[in-house]
Amino acid sequence: MALVLHTYKGNKGANKALIAAEYAGVKIEEASDFQMGVTNKSPEFLKMNPIGKVPVLETPEGAIFESNAIARYVSRKNGENSLNGSSLIDYAHIEQWIDFASLEIDTHMLKWFAPRLGFAPFSAPAEEAAISALKRGLEALNTHLASNTYLVGHSVTLADIVTICNLNLGFATVMTKKFTSAFPHVERYFWTMVNQPNFKKVLGDAKQTEAVPPVPSKKAPQPAKPKEEPKKAAPVAEAPKPAEEEEAPKPKAKNPLDLLPPSPMVLDDWKRLYSNTKSNFREVAIKGFWDMYDPEGYSLWFCDYKYNDENMVSFVTLNKVGGFLQRMDLARKYSFGKMLICGSEGPYKVKGLWLFRGPEIPKFIMDEVYDMELYEWTKVDISDEAQKERVSQMIEDAEPFEGEALLDAKCFK
């Protein structure tokens, strides 16, 4: 049985496998009768992927779904090759960049792209957060590519294939030249790779969009009015307003937090102090925090994960916390956070400390970030010295914390 790829034409996830197949010398047949919205809802397809998503690769040993997993399988189908590196450290770096391309590029790019094309509800704050997060990812990628032609080693690897397929969708839809010009090494890398024969055979001639798609109109279509018989000596009607005047965009609503009275605590100053303190952390950073802290303009909150008994696997728990922090991107301007994963073995305990602008947890965060309801939130009473000391310990990643080793400590700033 040949390898059969079930997908629609142009799917970026499928392109990863098809490009990998070109490099690895693997033959893949594309299902000719696939119809999105029909085939993927059939009982036969749902046996291969119960969620009904594409792509799916049908193999003699069984079906595979999830595009990165399919690409990994294809890259190894004919034995190990340069797509997977020449050493264990190469392999680890390839996996690192595959995850990076998915979590730091693709995730945020889709949050920008999907609402603009009507595939998801549009939210200006969410888009702003997605673009900001995407820029951070591209800045990191740009720095790496300043001294590297490829992501790993001196030839194309699976990391390049996955990254370019993700970038290609962004270049084609929302990442204009004006946007990407801030990342010249990423631009050079992208155009070099998409013009490699094996990439071009699958992707065709890559093109960059000239404009970001407009936000879909929320106006419902007006029902057609019945025609009226012409009336004699009708009064001259007032000239209609120009269309552009009727459609003038409303000014962007301000975040309620921007309307709060000014605070003597400047959040960026604290984040800078936290990042730049390399020694004497208690004496410099912690003391500086309490000197800066404004209980009128900000509030501190402890959070504890409600379902710690589920946290039996370390990397799953770490990914869970990482996903939460990604979804908090929309709050970056108004918050600072520390998340501690405690324990030397499962079940791991997830505990957090958050600093928010304003006296309460901002409503837009509670509305937009579904993870918030997975935690118990307790406002810190800074008049209680024990709670105040707990805040200090969480900021400095004190170990052991409450009698347990730290598996990891993550900072949101």
Image (cartoon, grey):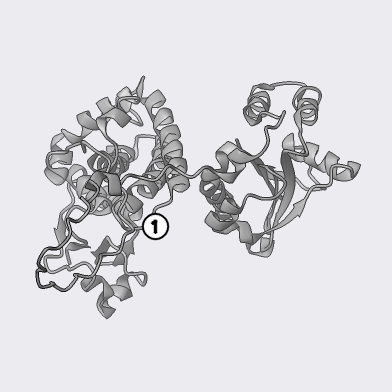
270 with respect to 246 (left or right): right
Q: Identify which residue is drawn at 76% across, 34% down.
A: 294
Is residue 279 positioned above or below 168 on the image? above
Snapshot quadrant of residue 119? bottom left
Label 1 residue SS: loop
Count of marks, rendered view: 1
Is residue 100 positioned above or below 219 on the image? above
Is residue 167 positioned above or below 49 on the image? above
Q: Residues within 10 Å of mark 1 (few under 14, many from 20)?
A: few
226 with respect to 275 (left or right): left
Question: Hey, which residue is sitting farthest front in the picture?
Answer: 233
What amino acid does circle 1 point to? Pro
Question: Which residue position is annotated with label 1?
Answer: 121
- Return the x and y of residue 228 as percentages of the image width and height: 13, 72
Q: Identify which residue is drawn at 72% across, 40% down.
A: 298
Name the residue nearer the viewer: 200 or 377.
Answer: 377
- Return the x and y of residue 48 as percentages of the image width and height: 31, 71
Q: Is residue 81 visible?
A: no
Identify the image quadrant of the C terminus. top right
Q: Is residue 220 visible?
A: yes
Identify the image quadrant of the N terminus. bottom left
- Return the x and y of residue 135 as percentages of the image width and height: 41, 33
- Return the x and y of residue 65 as percentages of the image width and height: 33, 62
Question: Hey, which residue is sitting farthest bottom in the picture?
Answer: 43
311 with respect to 249 (left or right): right
Name the residue nearer the viewer: 399 or 170.
Answer: 170
